[in-house]
Structures are given as structure tokens and as C-alpha cells.
Amino acid sequence: MQLGFVSAIFGDMSLEEVFQHASTLGYDCVEVMCWPPGGPDRKYGGVCHLDCTDFTQSQADDTRALSEKHGVAISALGYYSIPLSAQKDQADASRGHLRKVIDATALLGLPTTNSFVGANQNMNLEENFQQYEQVWPDIVRYAEDKGVRIGIENCPMLFDDTWPFGLNMARTPAIWRRMFEIIPSESFGLNYDPSHLQMQLMDPIAPIFEFGSRIFHAHAKDMRIDHNTLNEVGSLEPPMQRSTAKIPGFGDISWGKFIGALTDVGFDGPVCVEVEDEAFEGDVERRRQSLQISHSVLRPLIA
């Protein structure tokens, strides 16, 4: 396995600066965020460390040279917009730019593009699956033709304004089974983040043993459940009302069991720290500290 982090934590820096931080902090790789220029369309979206809009082979060569200069690999390209959005403009833009990110992934010689399936929050699950069957087979075939795999992150995007369905239907093992039955391609799998299962009060480790062959990439984000609040409001309220995203080691996930399960199923890919811990927002040193702590938790588990 390789230990990395998601570049979004340094969204105000250049890609070279991100590589410099990764190198000095002892990380092996970085998942590079590739939103189109112009800013976010949601919280934690919009970071553009690699503009894939008109990406060329020359730019790919320069990016690889930058990676090699600092001794830090690129684990994958990441673009987490909403291809099945209720907003047609957002859905169309997401689908179009995702293809550009896949193109850039191929030019860089990388194996994986990470994304969301998306969801129309105004539809039920069956209606969303109908959309999925219309949209996603073509996207996966496009990636296959480029020799690229797509890893779907299992974040449900459940917030006050997206409750109760969320903006990404790929949130549970039952849904993953149906997704992979409809699209059985070996180029279609998961960017597995245990925090999103923990947030839903589910076992974040057990699904690894069933879906191990589908895990192309992993995120390391912790989640702390506030049981006092849970006992007050119950489980039928937006989950982030009683859950807090934390860096590894500061939440409820057993990272030894997580890495052990990945090892058991033969996973040998990237595990990238994703910092969405509000306690570590702000100046550069505070953000670096979040990665230093995460490194100290995970490096003994990832040789």
C-alpha cells in the first residue's frame, strides 16, 4: 500500500507546493483534485490542482516530471461532482468534465479516476437507478476505452439541504451490489471511505471482505459519533447533526482493523488521508499538523 493525502487541503497552493509538502511530511502519493476552473459548486468542491479542460500530452509530461522531481506519486485524479444531479446544468457539466478528467488520467498513465455516481435528491432510489442505467454505462465504456478505472466514493452527501436522499446514491453495500450487477465492468469500482459508513451507524470494516476486488483506491477519514446527541435527536435527522468528520485517530474507526482488512483482501493500492476536520482548518501550519498526526497514525500500519 501507499500512504497519501487528498490535495484539497492545500487548495490555495500550486500543485508543486502540494508535492513539496507531501515530500517533507513523508507521504508517498497525492490524489490530485481536478475540478474545472471557476470555483466550487458545493462545500469541499472546486479545488483545481490540475486543469483538465484542454489537457495535452505535453502538460502530462510536465506533470509527471514534477511528480518525479519531488518523489511523490499521483495516486489518482479526483473530481467529485454530481453526474445525476437534479440540476440539469450541473449534471451536464459534471458528465462532460468527468470525461476530460478520464482523458487526463490516461495521458498521465495513471490507473484511476475517482468520482461520485451522483443522485437526483428529488427522486427515490428506483428512479435514480433508472437514471444510472441511462447515464453510467456510457461513462464506464468511455473509461474502459482509455484504459482507465473509475473509483466511486461512497459519500452520501447528506446535509440539511440534501436530506433525506443525498447527492450520491452509492452509499451502501446493498446499492453497490445493484450498481455492479448493472455495470459488471472490471474498470468500475470503489474509492472506499470508511467514515461514510461510520456516519450512517454501519460497520465500516465488514464490506471490505465482500467488495475487496472492487476497491481501487481508499480514503482515510475518521468519523466521531456524538452518542449524547444521537440519543437526543435519533437516527432520522441529518447524520452530520450527530457526527463530526475527524482526522485518523481522532474518531471512532479502528485503523488497525481497517488496514488489516484491506491487507487480507489483497489490496495494495493508495490510502489517502482526506482532511475535512474543522479543528484543523486555517493557516498552513495547522493543516500540515493534521497531516503529520494522520501520518503518525497510519504509517506504522502501512509499510
Image (spheres, rainbow, N blue to C red):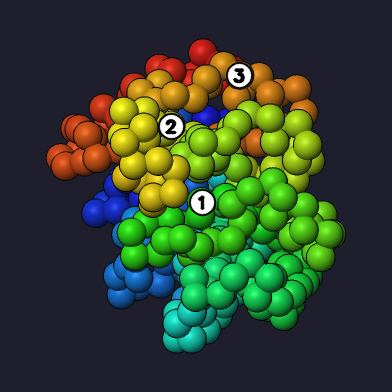
Helix, strand, or loop for circle 2?
A: strand
Q: Which residue is mark 3?
A: 257
- Residue at point 45% right, 57% down? 157
Q: Is residue 294 positioned above or below 269 on the image?
A: above
- Residue at point 61% right, 56% down? 170
Q: Position of residue 211 (x, y in %)?
A: 75, 40
Q: Position of residue 90 (x, y in %)?
A: 45, 80
Q: Which residue is mark 1?
A: 155
Q: Amino acid at mark 3?
A: Lys
Q: Position of residue 6 (x, y in %)?
A: 43, 44
Helix, strand, or loop for circle 1?
A: loop
Quadrant in which the C terminus appears: top right
Q: Residue 303, which numbered label?
A: none
- Residue at point 75% right, 45% down? 214
Q: CA distance from mark 3 to mark 1?
A: 20 Å
Q: Which residue is mark 2?
A: 222
Q: Position of residue 55 (x, y in %)?
A: 51, 72
Could you say which quadrant of the image residue 149 lies in?
bottom right
Question: Is residue 109 visible to the viewer in this orientation of the structure?
Answer: no
Q: Amino acid at mark 1?
A: Cys
Of labels 3 and 2, earlier in sequence is: 2
Helix, strand, or loop for circle 3?
A: helix
Q: Is residue 303 positioned above or below 204 on the image?
A: above
Say whether residue 200 is left or right of residue 16. right
Of labels 2 and 1, earlier in sequence is: 1
